[in-house]
Structures are given as C-alpha cells and as structure tokens.
Image: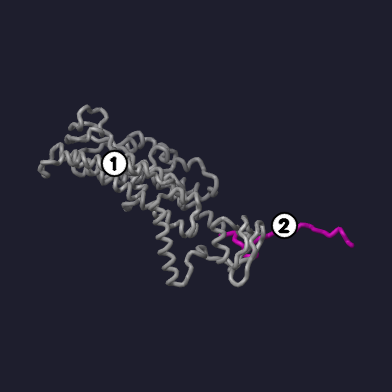
Amino acid sequence: MYARRAAQLLQELSSCEEGQLPPYNGDKFDQVIRECEEHSRQFQSLIRDKDIETKNEDHYGSFIHHLSIIRNKRCLMAYMYKRAEVIQSNRWNVGRVLPREIQDKLNFSEQEYFKDYCGVIDSYMKDLDLDLTVDMVPPKDPYIRVRVLSEIGEVSLGDHAVSLTKDSFHFLRRTDAEPFISQGLMEEFVE
Amino acid sequence: MPGYYDISDILMEDEAVSVVFHVGANGVGLLDPGTETNSVEKGAKIDLPFWLAHELCRRRAVSITIPSCFGQKMKKDVQADAACVDLGTRYPYFYEFGCKLFPLVGDKSIGPFLRHTFANRYKEMLSKSHTASLNAIPKFVLRLSKEEYQLFEAARSSMVEFKKWRVRDLGLMKTTIVGHKRKTDLH
C-alpha cells in the first residue's frame, strides 16, 4: 500500500541497462491497480456525508488516500512511458523485425504499439521517398568490407545477385549491408 | 525541473523521512505499524515516504524532522574529508533530496552545506574522471551520488573521445620503429 509496490516496478525498470527492458511485469501492474481501488474505497468511506471544508481527521485521512492514488498513477504512467520510449528506439537501432528475446519481454499491447509505430515511420519515409533508418552514424565511405557470420544465401542487391555464404568476405555498399549488420548476420571487417 | 515521467525523480521521492503529525488522520492505520486503531494519532512520529511528507507539510499537517543525512554526524564527516564520504550506497539522491527538503524544514544551513560538500568532492572527482579508462571502474565511483556519477561519466567519456581524436588516423601519425632490416640474403 501507499505506492511501495509501484516504486518496486520502477526500480525493476531503472535497474536495467539503457535501451534494454525487463519483461513486462503484468502481475505487479495489476496489483498496483487493485491498490488504487482499495485507496478509492477507503477514500469514499471517509468523505461520505462530510462537509469538505472541515479539516478533521477524516479529511486528512482521505487526503492521504487521494495522494496515494495520484502517486500510483504517476508511477504507472512513468513505467509505460519509459517502456514506450525504449520500444521506439528499438525500431531505429534494431530494425523492423524484433528478435525473439526482445519480443518476449513485451506484452500484447506493446507489440501492437511497435507495429503501429513502424507503420507510421514507414508511411512517413514513403512520402519522403527516403530511408531514414540507414546511416545513423555518418559513414566515412559508401562501401565497406563485410564478413558474413551466418548463412544467408542468395540475395539480390541492386542489379546483381550475391551469394552470402558463411565466412565469406564481400565488398558491399553500406546501405545494403546495414540491415544485415544490425541483425547480427554480418560484421564489418576492420583491418 | 525534473519532469512528470522522470524515473529518478520518482525514486528519489520514495526516500523515507521521519515526520511528526500535528493532526490526527483516520483510515490510514497502515502508515503506523504501532497503532491498534485504523488511524494515526496527533503527535505520532512516523516514517513516511518523501512524496507524502512533502504534500502534508505544505498543508501544515505534519512537520518534517531533518534526516540523518543532513545531521551533525554527517557534517562532521564532511568536515573531516568530504571525498571519502560514501554517498553512493547510503544516500544516492543526496543533492536532489537536499534541494527539495530545504524549503520545508526550518534549518537554513542545509543549502550552504550541500554546496560545500559538492565543491569539496568535485575536485577529486574531476581529476579521477580524466584519468579513468573506459572499462575499469575505480572503487571510488561507488561512493558517488547519482548526480555526481552522471558528471563523472560525462567527463570520462569526453576524455576518452578526446584521446581517440588525438590519435586518429591521418595517415601520418603512426610511426613504426625503423629497424635495421638488412637483407642478408643476397641472391
């Protein structure tokens, strides 16, 4: 009670590294909501038939319950907001498809949020006719050397097809290689 | 000012402070583990989280006792050696908490005390952050409060970037030791 559980939720979130999420703690979230309902019940029982202006013990008790509800609300909102921010950054850092271990940490509405966010970004990029998610760091060179880490197979890049077998080296355009590098299937080969 | 969604501000406001109630309050018996009825008596001394104490103090329902982190013992510790005081484990939100507490209690010395502590710790922190490498975490970092740690990280990463910039590949900087490589093989 009195927002201790809500603070624990936030502790969990802040103990993760920047850009990472803990699994969605639906149980604790629901417990905090039930606590809010309990505070609300207590509040109702304290203010019934009372004149709001008199500052007696019931007034202060009801005020404490009111503050607890506001505090719980702030904690829950901050929890959702922070998770939404990390999900948004995942679209830019990881790509359109989230790996399994990240998807498992999101609840259903967060996964829907991610899909909708991707849709919004895609329609915006289509209007601009520009892919904004490549070249997040300004490149020194339009071409880079890459080494393929896992078997990808035949891929057609531009006007020719390249066979990306494991442990093969290629000299590709940076924009073509970036989606594979961000998924971990290729790495940049630095001499 | 920290925002509504700022998680470290929310966690900071969860710190416990000891308060004395000027009024009674019904229906909130859970706040006081010693009470038998479901209410808090006038004059009771209870530990409340700061967010609650702050609001009640504004409405003059309670008065806040100065917590130990700004008390006499702490002042003596800081006087002796400010840089050795362990804020990281004991009071990670030392400065933010002090700034918020200051207007609510009568003690006017908290403000200058915070400034004095920070100024003394800053010198050593600055020099250590410039020499620290990116991987090793010096032990003294554990003694820094959250705000000091952010400053430390900013200084450390900017120093590392500076060093990288100094030795960046211009095509000229790398000098190899010109050994006496003689071709003994003459055919």
Q: In the orientation shown, which residue stands out farthest toward the right?
A: B187
Label 1: chain? A
Residue A16 coordinates in the image, percent (x, y): 45, 46
Q: Are marks 2 and 1 on the same chain?
A: no
Residue A151 coordinates in the image, percent (x, y): 62, 57
**In the image, is B136 to the left or to the right of B114?**
right
Residue B167 on the magenta span: yes
Q: Secondary structure at mark 2?
A: loop
Label 2: chain? B
Q: Amino acid at mark 1?
A: Arg
Residue identifier under label 1:
A34
Q: Disc 2 and disc 1: Cα gap in Å?
A: 72 Å
Q: Amino acid at mark 2?
A: Ile
Q: Which residues are magenta?
A: B165-187
Circles 2 and 1: CB distance less than 8 Å?
Answer: no
Which residue corresponds to the image point at 42% horizontal and 38% vertical from the top-left?
B89
Q: Secondary structure at mark 1?
A: helix
